[in-house]
Amino acid sequence: MRSNEAVEQTNLMEWTEYIAGRYPEIRLLFHIPNGGSRNKIEAANLKKQGVKSGVPDLFLPVARGEYFGLFIEMKVKKNRTTDKQKEWISNLRLQGYRCEVCYGWEAASEVLIDYLDKGRTIRF
């Protein structure tokens, strides 16, 4: 079976169900559906509604360490981030978010565990 980003992301989301007992906040992880092919009318409507090119694929709105949350951009094989994705990642990091590009679900799972094992962010 050929691997693609959708398959890898599905594998990751299935994996989160297995670790939710230890890390219940993993249930807050969600996909930002900015990608995919759409017809011109649907694409125009989604753009009006706030869909933006380059936004990372996944977001975990859980503060850890010095970060306000974690964004993950999923990639497979030799795929590389686009200029728009690099721009979003850079800007999100400047705003205090951890952002990672992960090649495959296993890499993303390692990032998630590393992130969730950090101490809780102090609330002001």
Image (cartoon, rainbow, N blue to C red):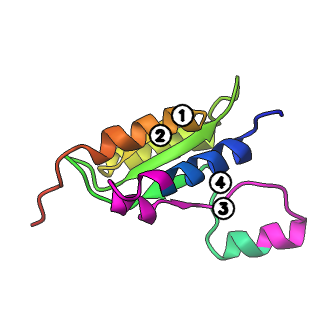
The C terminus, quarter of image? bottom left
Q: Position of residue 46 (x, y in %)?
A: 72, 72
On the image, numbered disc 4 is attached to which residue?
53
Q: Nearer the viewer, mark 2 or mark 4?
A: 2
* Dot 3: element: loop
Looking at the picture, which amino acid does disc 4 mark? Ser
| Residue hosting label 2 | 109
- Residue at which label 1 appears: 106
User: Residue at coordinates 61% horizontally, 43% vertically from top-left?
Assistant: 84
Cα distance between the residues tagged 1 and 3: 21 Å
Q: Tag 1: Cα neighbours inside 10 Å, few (<14), some, or many (≥20)?
A: some
Q: Of residues 65 and 93, which is closer to you in this image?
A: 65
Disc 2 to disc 4, C-alpha distance: 24 Å
Alpha carbon of mark 1 to alpha carbon of mark 2: how far? 5 Å
The residue located at (76%, 76%) in the rendering is 45
Residue 33 bears which disc, if any?
Answer: 3
Identify the residue at horizontal 48%, vertical 52% (top origin): 18
Say which of marks 3 and 2 sits in front: 2
Inspect the image, locate mark 3, and give the three-letter code of the amino acid beneath it: Pro
- Report if residue 58 lies within the magenta region: no
Q: Where is residue 101 drawn, in percent x and y?
A: 52, 35
| Label 1 with label 2: CB-CB less than 8 Å | yes
For the N terminus, give its image quadrant.
top right
Residues at marks 4 and 1, CA–CA distance in whole angstroms:
25 Å
Magenta-drawn segment? 18-44
Three-letter amino acid code of the residue under disc 2? Ser
Secondary structure found at label 4: loop
